[in-house]
Image (cartoon, rainbow, N blue to C red):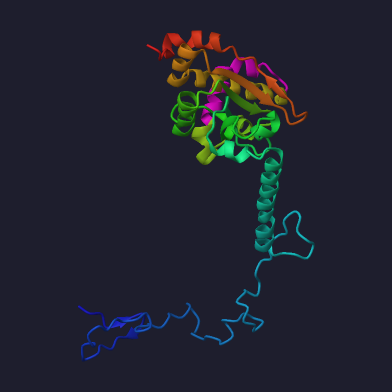
Amino acid sequence: MIPSRVGGQHLRLAASRPNPGYRPSAASFKPARRPASGGSRNVSSSSSTGASGSGSGSAPNAKIPARLPGMAENDHDVERYLRENHQRLFENNKQWADQRLKEDPEFFTNLAAGQSPEYLWIGCSDSRIPAEAITGLQAGEAFVHRNIANLVISTDLNVMSVINYAVRHLKVKHIVVCGHYSCGGVKAAMTPKDMGLLNPWLRNIRDVYRLYEKELDAIKDEKKRYDRLVELNVIEQCRNVIKTADVQHSFEENRYPIVHGWVFNFEDGRITDLSVDMKKILGDIQKIYNLTE
């Protein structure tokens, strides 16, 4: 049955069929809008231009975006500021490329030829600790993987693929797991609350706390306990690296890679070597995790 009313309006059906090739447009049928409840339909011609009557299209009470750091006092054009500020990365890149060529005319020729890094760096995603900057490594000297709280999880295909490629194909000689004090991920894991999507990720750090619960609970100073969990998390992630088949096979055949656990300190910019004993850890875990047979 064809409805006789739509949106409160009567439908009129044409008696004749449309011409061949006729296609109805969006304007062919426009039922009137329902009036607001309790009110009458009264459309003002100024409604499309705002209260001021101007054709700017902006709402009369539009919220003015907050200025970002670096913006002029009376400047509220955030989009323009971000576009202009973004351009500095390209300017920096040009200066960097020019400087590299000035120092070594063959720099990019060599860079394009391939990579053979000595190090695999597994670090935290924190923007304050770029691997190359804090170690003095140059382009091509480190294969880098970063995530929240520098975790090495066996079900994370991202980090597992990185380890596989670095060990089996790039033949890295060292694997560094580098955490840092004041790590937000570790701090969040120490907080007994629902973190939503982060819960399954942070559970890996909470499991580290569970493993070392007695040691950590004995530390009364909260900051020192927090720092110690950062260190223990790095040590456990080193253990997870050593558990992988790629590392075990390569170490048995080549005596490398060597796994290191480091922690970076924002307060003085120094790296602390946690002196991870790879041979001892490997010997301890191979009763269960021996994957070289």
34 part of magenta stretch: no
Furthest residue toward front: 105
> Residue 49: x percent and y percent?
60, 81
Q: Looking at the image, which residue is at 62% across and 35% down?
A: 139
Q: Is residue 245 above or below residue 159?
A: above
Which residue lies most toward the right here? 73
Q: Nearer the viewer, residue 283 or 257?
A: 257
272 shown above or below 283: below
Magenta span includes 214: yes
Q: Residue at point 50% right, 8% down? A: 283
Viewer-closest of 8 and 258: 258
Q: Quadrant of residue 6?
A: bottom left
- Residue 30 in the figure: left or right of residue 255: left
Query: Which of 103 and 117 lies nearest the eye of the viewer?
Result: 103
Residue 71 x, y percent position in the rendering? 75, 59
Q: Residue at x 50, y 81 (%)?
A: 39
Quadrant where the N terminus lies? Answer: bottom left
Residue at (49% x, 84% y) in the render: 40
Instruction: Determine if residue 192 is in view.
Output: no
Q: Position of residue 28 (x, y in %)?
A: 34, 84
Q: Which quarter shows the C terminus?
A: top left
Residue 93 appears in the figure = yes
Q: Is residue 185 left or right of residue 1?
A: right
- The boundaries of the magenta stretch are 203-221
